[in-house]
Image (cartoon, rainbow, N blue to C red):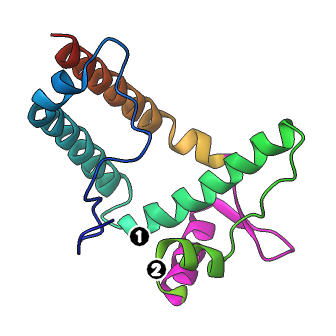
């Protein structure tokens, strides 16, 4: 179930509390965990806002393409039938972003050289993406690791 803002209204099914942490300890620290996650998410949103010159829709469209491309790469390596790459219609369906907006964002990403259109009218990330986002990815990884460490420390205290 979700509320009007699409936030979950109950814990996810199958939530596994880390080994050695009782549900009571977890619940007693929920306020601190909430603050740590808020700091993490806000810093990530701020970084994405700055990296995409304020265009978070562009960020989301690229993220959908990169995510699907990455899944496809690993599926192929494991011998699975890969999922299709994204096109404007599927990105619109997944994100809820209007199709015309998605088309404009795709054109911008092609112009930046971050994605390219295949002969089958699909979009795939280019090698340029790894270079452009290397430091950004390192920053995100560092922030995630520090947040995870803080969460572990709170739950083990």
Image height check: is 7 above or below 108? above
* Residue at horizontal 63 percent and vertical 68 percent from the top: 110
Q: How many labels does the image show?
A: 2
Q: Is residue 18 left or right of residue 157?
A: right
Circle 2/circle 1 CB separation < 8 Å: yes
The residue tagged with tag 2: helix, strand or loop?
Answer: loop
Image coordinates of residue 102 in percent, x first then y, are: 53, 79
Q: Does the magenta stretch include residue 102?
A: yes
For label 1, the crowd category at 10 Å Cα-Cα, with few meaning under 14, some 14 to 19 and many 20 or more, is some
- Relative height, residue 36 to residue 3 (above, below): above
Q: Nearer the viewer, residue 29 or 88?
A: 29
Q: Closer to the N terminus: mark 2 or mark 1? A: 1
Q: Name the residue under label 1.
A: 57
Q: What segment carries the magenta color?
A: 100-127
Residue 3: x percent and y percent? Answer: 24, 69
In this rendering, position of residue 156 left or right of residue 51: left
Residue at screen point 52% across, 66% down: 61
Evaluate whether residue 38 shows in this view: yes
Q: What residue sits right under mark 2 in the picture?
A: 97
User: Which marked residue is nearer to the observer: mark 2 or mark 1?
Assistant: 2
Q: What element carries label 1?
A: helix
Residue 103 belongs to the span the image colors magenta: yes
Seen in the image, is 112 located left or right of residue 50? Answer: right
What percent of the width, then of the height, locates residue 14?
44, 40
Residue 144 falls in which quadrant of the image? top left
Quadrant of the image for the C terminus? top left
Q: Residue at x 44, y 29 (%)?
A: 138
Question: Quick check: can you spot residue 114?
Answer: no
Compared with 76, 88 (above or below) is below
Farthest residue to the bottom: give it: 100
Q: Distance between the residues labelled 2 and 1?
A: 8 Å
Q: Could you tell me residue 31's position as x and y percent? A: 9, 36
């Amino acid at each position: 179930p979700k509320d009007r803002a699409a936030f979950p209204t109950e814990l996810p099914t199958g939530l596994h509390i880390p080994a050695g942490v009782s549900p009571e300890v977890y619940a007693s620290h929920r306020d601190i965990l909430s603050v740590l996650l808020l700091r993490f998410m806000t810093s990530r949103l701020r970084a994405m806002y700055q990296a995409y010159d304020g265009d978070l829709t562009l960020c989301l469209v690229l993220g959908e393409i990169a995510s699907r491309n990455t899944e496809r790469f690993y599926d192929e390596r494991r011998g699975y039938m890969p999922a299709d790459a994204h096109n404007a219609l599927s990105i619109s369906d997944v994100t809820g972003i209007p199709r015309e907006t998605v088309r404009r964002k795709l054109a911008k990403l092609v112009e930046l050289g971050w994605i390219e259109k295949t002969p089958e009218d699909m979009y795939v990330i280019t090698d340029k993406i790894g270079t452009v986002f290397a430091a950004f990815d390192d920053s995100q990884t560092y922030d995630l690791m520090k947040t995870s460490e803080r969460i572990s420390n709170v739950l083990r205290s």
